[in-house]
Image (cartoon, rainbow, N blue to C red):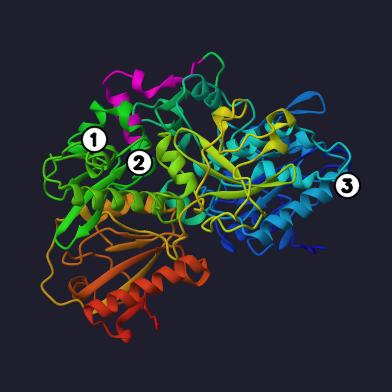
Amino acid sequence: MYQIEWLGMTRNNFKPGTPDRIRMVVLHATAGTYPGDLKWLRQGGAPGREVSVHYYINKRGHIVQLVADHDIAWHAGVSRWEVDGRTVYGCNEVSIGIELENRNDGRDPYPPEQYAAARWLTRELVQKYQIPPNQVVRHLDIAPGRKTDPAGFPWQRFVSEVFADLPGAPTMPPTEQMRQRMLDVAYRAAGSGLPASWPFATTARTLHLGMPVASLIARPPASRAASSPNDRERVLSLPDGTRYLVEVYARDALFATVGPDDTLRPEDPIQRLRDVPASPQRLALLDAVFRAADPINGFQPGWAFHQYFLDHEDELGMPISHNHRLALAPGWHVACQHFALDSLCSPVGQWQVIYRLSDIRRAAAGQMILSGLSRERARQLANLLLDDLFALRTGRRYQAEAALVQYALDEDLGAPLGPPETDVVDGIPIALMPFALDVVACRLPTPDWPLDRPLPPGNPFGRLTALLGSHRQGVAGIIRLSRLHNVRSLPVMKATPLVGSSRPDRPFIDVSLFAGDGEVRRRAIDTIIVVPTPGPASLALTQAHTAAHWHYYIDHTGTVFRLRHERYVARAARGIGLPAEQLDQRALVIAVEGELDHAPPTLRKATKALIQLLCRHFQISSNRIHVGEMTMHL
């Protein structure tokens, strides 16, 4: 049994109501962190952006109530939904709002304690107010043209568990349950969710564009990012004043104009990026698509990589990673950028020499010859690129013989888009994993079966007969989203894991390739400065590239970005109460997303590990580590 703490509002940014008005529950994500997001909600937002919500749940599962159920909180904004057979415009009047502490970027997890508290609270509200399943919704469902929250939340599983064993629980054939779970995994990997009857998804399916890669969002102004958490706005404003919704799929990006209320207009068709002729509009859209994957560089028409992309867009697909540096061997570095269907790399400094991962793999197999690459070097480079791709997108090691990995490679499903997940559908434990062109799934012996452990002898690998019906008896194999009604069996599988093992740490991403300018140091490095930044990471990284203030940046997931070579000066010492000019010459600057005092363990762990590494390398003493004006002791 959970306890609900009554906290109330410091400003009464809500309206009186009555209990009989309550016909919906709406889940949100704050796009912030505790305690700042709770403080902002409790004070009613900011002038011009007045908000309120009934409940707030932090990552530890603590439930706070800010507005009484019967009163009308201002959480839904411009919204629309079918409620008890009639269309309601402005869902505040009939709903209860629940905010979850989460950055709402698709990568910030919802811990089990928070998930369980949200499930309990929603279940209590559903029973108390007799709310049907189709009226428990996400913000992105009722405002699909504007909102993405709660991005990354396991929605289909959540709804089924909220209504489990309740009267009126949703009934769905097992195959349809499976399809919904697979779509949920795919859109979660793209940092969003799939709203009901979402026209972009329908168009992408009709055009065979593959799975979603990213849901583009507008970056908030720096002042807003620093002071006022809010779920992300989907509408992008281009330099010419045009306003678009943009969603990126594996093979192309889709976009549509929006009306004055930032919602889709039925008369405006969904358009494809590839159909836009060369123009400032196309360039602006390309830059937005590339910045979703690489906020530092975006799209650079003069770069050889991006010129190559324009000539081979069909074969490469859309970008899914930063343009970053990898070390193959001492003195042998490559620049790399991953796309949904292939990856590109160039030896550093030889920008006109471009290799494709697909060609490198063929060279490693002796099926073709690539100038400048021996067969052994091609094998090493292919493994390096694949291991980097899996680290960035799944947090796991690349293991070619792993069953799901091998299947995706053999079937040309493209890049992995997110980590594998486990779920239970119709009582059967399954593993699911999204790739660029499809989502794959197979049966597990138990719900908690480690995915990097071989399946036991005699396990009916991939056998999902209970899900697919008795007429599928004897079918064994990996289930694919695109073939749920036409399942093919696999050959007898070897005793291999499903995927590679988990990595203990988040990736180290070296994006310092094109930051080789500025003032060169004249003194030895003997100081480390840790600078807190407001975030979000995408905004901070975009600004960092032009400001040249930092050497490293660590986001809330613990991912470390190397922004600038240590031999160049970074001007972040000014304004922290230390001798600025002296420190400019002697300091390494590490920026972190948010305040360390309230940082998640992943960020704190990564910060400590990086500082220890730099201290050993540059022989920096512990009393020369500063967080602002404070000395940090390891």
Give coordinates of residue 156: x percent, y percent.
68, 41
The residue carrying mark 3 is: 128
The one nearer the camera, 364 or 229, is: 364
Picture quadrant of residue 116: bottom right
Give coordinates of residue 287: x percent, y percent.
32, 35
In screen coordinates, is 310 left or right of 87? left
Give me the C-alpha separation between circle 1 and circle 3: 56 Å
What label does residue 306 carry, if any?
1
Residue located at (37% from left, 78% from top): 629
The one nearer the camera, 204 or 469, is: 469
- Range shown magenta: 268-288
In screen coordinates, is 530 left or right of 29? left
Tag 1: amino acid: His
Give me the C-alpha separation between circle 2 and circle 3: 45 Å
- Circle 3: is it few (<14), some (14-19), or many (20+) Cα within 10 Å? few
SS at mark 2?
Answer: helix
Reply yes or no: does residue 354 show up in magenta. Answer: no
Mark 1 or 2, nearer chain start: 2
- Residue depth check, mark 1 versus mark 2: number of the one nearer the observer: 1
The one nearer the camera, 261 or 592, is: 592
